[in-house]
Image: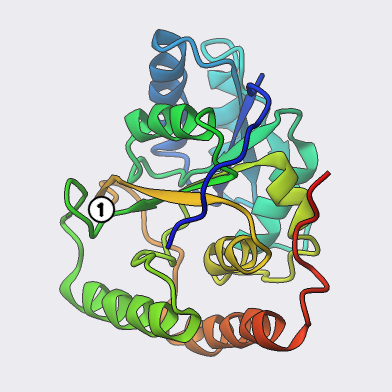
Amino acid sequence: MNSVPRDKAVLQLLSVVIPAQNEEDCIASTVEHLHVELRLHNVPHEIIVVDDGSTDGTWTALESAKGRVPTMAPVKNPGPHGFGRAVAHGFANMTGDAAVVMMADESDDCRDVVRYWEKLNEGYDCVFGSRFMRGGGAIDYPKMKLLLNRLANYFIKVLFRISLNDTTNAFKAYRKEVVDGCQPLIAPHFNATIELPLKAIVRGYSWTTIPITWRNRRTGTSKLQLREMGSRYLFICLYVWLEKYFSRGDYRRVDK
């Protein structure tokens, strides 16, 4: 069951963290569309794009877009590189009291960022999006990746006895106290997508799920290498599972 939200202070600033590696063809349009959507809905925000060791023109594209997106703050991850490390670097540079992790390739719908902000302001500590619940959708999802995704998420759902059915999706929202309370983040690669939400659930933060829409990238190539990630995902699952059942609550959130 989802946790019940507690009384929370109204959020002041949303930090959208976008890891980017070799995304010169789409990063400018991603941040521009996001900025327009957030501005239209009066969401106070900053957009932190983390260039994670790109070897193409990603950084040049970001510098060019700065004039059109005044709320964007591009930073470089000096290394070591990896999706999880880029997300952690973005968190370290955020000034907001809430964060959304978003992909650079426009696969995530920027309208859902607004809905995340609204849900967080209802008092939830975390808001998780699901592409596989009523109202959600996954457009042009490769069949083999879809099969592996559903198997992995079912395994996590059973292992942790949770109702969330899209844990592996990176596109999620957190209050800053959750980001701080789930440190240290140790997953260096795409297994970071499951570390933070599972830790947040295990450590007792409130959460809810909303339907979201995902569309397969239209430019560039995916950075997720499935053959390399299986053991890494399993490691993080077991790491957090051991905390859940054997840490005796040492890491659970403490009400102030």
Residue 120, horizontal then vertical, whole percent: 52, 34
Is 8 placed left or right of 115 in the picture? Answer: right
- Displayed quadrant of residue 146: bottom left
Q: Which residue is drawn at 65% across and 79% down?
A: 240
What kind of colouring is applied to the model shown?
rainbow
Q: Secondary structure beneath disc 1?
A: loop
The image shows residue 65, relative to residue 200, as above or below, that is above
- Answer whether residue 77 is visible to the viewer in this image: no
The image shows residue 188, relative to residue 248, as above or below, that is above
Residue 191, horizontal then vertical, whole percent: 56, 72
Q: Residue at x 61, y 40 (%)?
A: 6
Instruction: Name the image quarter holding the C terminus.
Output: top right
Residues packed near mark 1 inside 10 Å, few (<14), some (14 to 19) or many (20 plus): some
Residue in the foreground of this view, choosing between 47 and 125:
125
The image shows residue 165, relative to residue 12, as above or below, that is below
- Answer whether residue 62 is visible to the viewer in this image: yes
Residue in the foreground of this view, choosing between 105 and 114:
114
The image shows residue 191, relative to residue 86, as above or below, that is below
Residue 102, horizontal then vertical, whole percent: 48, 44
The three-letter code of the residue at mark 1 reads Asn
- Displayed quadrant of residue 188: bottom right
Is 139 placed left or right of 205 in the picture? Answer: left
Instruction: Name the image quarter holding the N terminus.
Output: bottom left
Q: Name the residue under label 1.
A: 216
Q: Which residue is drawn at 39% across and 61% down?
A: 222
How many numbered discs sit on the rendered protein?
A: 1
Residue 239, horizontal then vertical, whole percent: 67, 84
Is 139 placed left or right of 30 in the picture? Answer: left
Q: Residue at x 51, y 48 (%)?
A: 4
